[in-house]
Image (cartoon, helix red, strand yellow):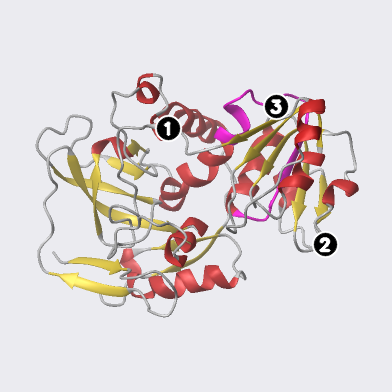
Amino acid sequence: MSFRRNRMTTAGWEQSLELIEEHQLPDPPAGWVRLRIECCGVCHRDLIDRSGRVPFVNFPVTPGHEACGYVDALGEGVDRWSLGDRVATLHRDACGSCSACETGEPSLCIGATQIFGITIDGGYSSHLLAPQSALFAVPESLDARLAATLACTYGTAWRALSRHGAPTAGDVVVVVGAHGGVGRCVVELAKRLGAEVVAVVRRDSDDGLRALGADHLIVNHDGRFHKQMPCAPAKVVVDCVGAATINASLRCLGVGGRLVLVGNIDERRSELQLGRMIVYGLQVVGSSGANHAELKTLLEWHAKEPFNPIFGSSYGLNEADQAMRDLRAGSCSGRLIIDPSLDQSN
């Protein structure tokens, strides 16, 4: 069986990804497993990695951190997984022994450093070597596309909403960047909690947001969308954009409100309105990847009342570079997917 993987050899867009085919599958080292990949999502973080904004990318590297598949080889000492297990990737591994890991927060681990698509190869490939701690189990019944992207989309959204106290029925939740993959999930989950949901978008298009649960849509024409708030101030604002929107997001909050930062679309630095934060008693927190307990909650929730993800086009491995360029162009609707079974060189 051949091993096919895309390689990103340098930062930037001048050079395309290179699809390499090898005639021998790699063996997993101790504590790692090998997956036969079903599919891999194409995330905006992949674009950030490729753009050169991450200074420690280990080139050459295979992009992709949203993969799912089946365990088909075990390294020495693996005790969490068995051959044939269906699993999906977290963003990174965890040491299991630091203070964060011991309190159930492996995404905040300070003792491990393997990050898919940055320091180790990711999922734009036919097979993937992964630390056993960087995976979570997914049921056979789950759509492979949702299994692959669950942690990065719904997982990120749920952690942003719930880690510091989930909103309750009647609370106002503002989602900035609601057209994006994570933003759509925040809208859906916030509405399921009974919140009044305000979706802030950059174009005058519903794109299914009201069907997901948005009660109000604000089109951000000039960066002052806080002046268009159609309801009471927010209990929680989840900002999926970053520097361009952070201060307007703050101004959407009521007394004691919380701004959760998820997006980092550009690398500009931000100046915060400290006086407002102090007088209003506001919280500003960053939100990282979901942990195992949060993902378990989501899988149980989905089993009872299925989520409504939107997926865009699927691409073969030989089309992975085009998939990234299509996402970068900004005209895609739904999560793009890399599917090795569609590879024309397969």
Q: CA distance from mark 2 to mark 3?
A: 28 Å
Q: Is residue 169 magenta?
A: yes
> Which residue bears the numbered disc 1?
108
Q: Earlier in the sequence, mark 2 or mark 3?
A: 3
Specify the segment rendered in magenta. 159-180
The residue where tag 3 is placed is 167
- Per the image, label 1 sits on a secondary structure element best described as helix
**Other residues around mark 1 within 10 Å, as few (<14) / some (14–19) / many (≥20):** some
Is residue 202 depicted above or below 306 in this figure?
A: below
Vertical placement of residue 276 versus 315, above or below: above
Q: Residue at x 48, y 63 (%)?
A: 47
Q: Considering depth in this image, is 247 or 253 the residue closer to the camera?
A: 247
- Secondary structure under tag 3 reads loop
Q: Is residue 34 magenta?
A: no
Question: What's under tag 2, amino acid-wise?
Answer: His
Q: Position of residue 267 (x, y in %)?
A: 57, 57
What number is the disc on residue 316?
none
Q: CA distance from mark 1 to mark 3?
A: 23 Å
What residue did someone put label 2 on?
Answer: 221
Report which quarter residue 110 is drawn in.
top left
Residue flagged by tag 1: what amino acid is it? Leu
Q: Quadrant of residue 5?
A: bottom left
Q: Quadrant of the N terminus?
A: bottom left
Residue at x-position 32% and y-position 56%:
122
- x%, y% of residue 74? 14, 41
**Mark 2 or mark 3: which is in front?**
2
Residue type indicated by callout 3: Pro
Q: Give the SS element for disc 2.
A: loop
Quarter of the image for the C terminus: give it.
Answer: bottom left
Quarter of the image holding residue 84? top left
Q: Earlier in the sequence, mark 1 or mark 2?
A: 1
